[in-house]
Image: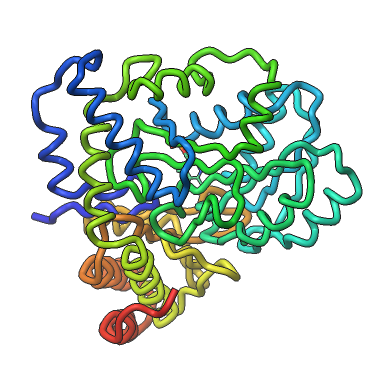
Amino acid sequence: MYKEHLVSPGPTAVPPDALLAMAKPIYHHRTKRFDALFGEVSQKLKTIFSTTRDVFTLTSSGSGAMEAAVVNTINAGDKVITINGGKFGERWAKINKKYGAIVDEIVVPWGKSVDPMAVDAKLKADPSVVAVFVQHCETSTGAMHDVKALAAVTAKYNAILVVDAITALGVHECAMDAWGIDILLSGSQKALMIPPGLALIALSDKAWKRVEQCKTPVFYFDLRAAKKELEKKTTPWTPALTLVIGLNSVIDMMIAEGLPNVYARHANIAAATRKGCEALGLKVFPENPANGVTAALAPKGLSGKKIKSVMEEKYKVSIAGSQDVEKADIIRIGHIGYYDKSDIVLTLSSLEFALKDLGHSFTWGASLAAAQEVLYTGAPKV
Ligand SMILES: *Cc1c(COP(=O)(O)O)cnc(C)c1O
């Protein structure tokens, strides 16, 4: 028998308290009971988002919040900049093009992060650009973009900054109000530690001005309707009630741990995972690595896909592979949300089993020794 372990960059492990909360009998959502829950969750989400703005809870996967960001702010013919440093950045251009935006895509090589000055130069050259779309963590490459610096750039122009923080919010500091992020969005199945099905989005005043003049047809993801209903502590459509109950439980967990401690825990286990991979000859892929997902190159002669499948099928430890092997033959280990030191030890140990099966040469325990040193000495300052 092998126990199953999910160490992918989404979906992620769900804490037992949240599982138990979600196992309780369902009730009707047009009730005072739901309004009280939803009001409380929406209020507490502001802490997670570091904002005083409303945080809207949509029933969809994370991409629904990406689409909502576009469809509520962008008119056909508007000029936008999208930052494409991987699969998720590429999605920003795809969504914008569907709705008729004129897209200027900044293509960043896989594993690299965008230069905020390149965005500044573009906005300076064309101040009619209405929005800049980016990921905080580009999950396909494990790279962070410097959202704080990007927000300082967009603050000088007309353009709003739209940040997909689906694998960063709850992992890294992401100070929406203090940094000046205009739209910040996330999804339930990553650092929020519950199953897929909820998307979250918050908007600054600058972003709301764009919503008010936006004429793009929208029905399900109409944030004006969501705002009207949130004032009454409810949603326009049937909410994924079970997931909202789970969300309440995990937010309490995060607040009890303390957000700075949550970020420090991720920084520590990410640093340990990186050291462990490097000790086995798997080079960390991104230049500026995120703390939620470790992307590491397969060693010479081995394929990332093969390593992933041996770990998953033989050892029941489920990591992720590359989303584009041509661009980077990597494995991606997720440590987003409900993960601690022992999860990293377990994952690296199974990685060693798989590498041994595949004939890779290394000393048993090399990754564990390297990781344990980091895990033991504790969290680096974030
Ligand atoms: C997971 C993820 C998404 C959302 O994908 P869905 O499959 O729609 O939930 C979007 N952006 C990033 C950076 C992600 O990691």
- The image quadrant where one finds the N terminus is bottom left
Query: In the rendered image of this protein, does residue 379 appear above or below residue 211?
Result: below
76 or 324, which is in the foreground? 76
Q: Quadrant of residue 108?
A: bottom right
Please report the residue visible at 30 percent of the width from the left and 53 percent of the height from the top: 318
- The image quadrant where one finds the C terminus is bottom left
309 or 42, which is in the foreground? 42
Q: Seen in the image, is 235 located left or right of residue 203?
A: left
Please report the residue visible at 27 percent of the width from the left and 39 percent of the height from the top: 247
Q: Seen in the image, is 231 located left or right of residue 84?
A: left
User: Can residue 6 be seen at all in this image of the molecule?
Assistant: yes
Q: Quadrant of residue 20?
A: top left
Q: Quadrant of residue 159?
A: top right
Measured as percent of width and height from the top left, residue 141 is found at 55, 57
User: Can residue 364 be seen at all in this image of the molecule?
Assistant: no
Measured as percent of width and height from the top left, residue 215 is found at 69, 16
Please report the residue visible at 78 percent of the width from the left and 62 percent of the height from the top: 117
Please report the residue visible at 41 percent of the width from the left and 19 percent of the height from the top: 229
Measured as percent of width and height from the top left, residue 335 is found at 34, 60
166 or 154, which is in the foreground? 154
Measured as percent of width and height from the top left, residue 276 is found at 37, 77
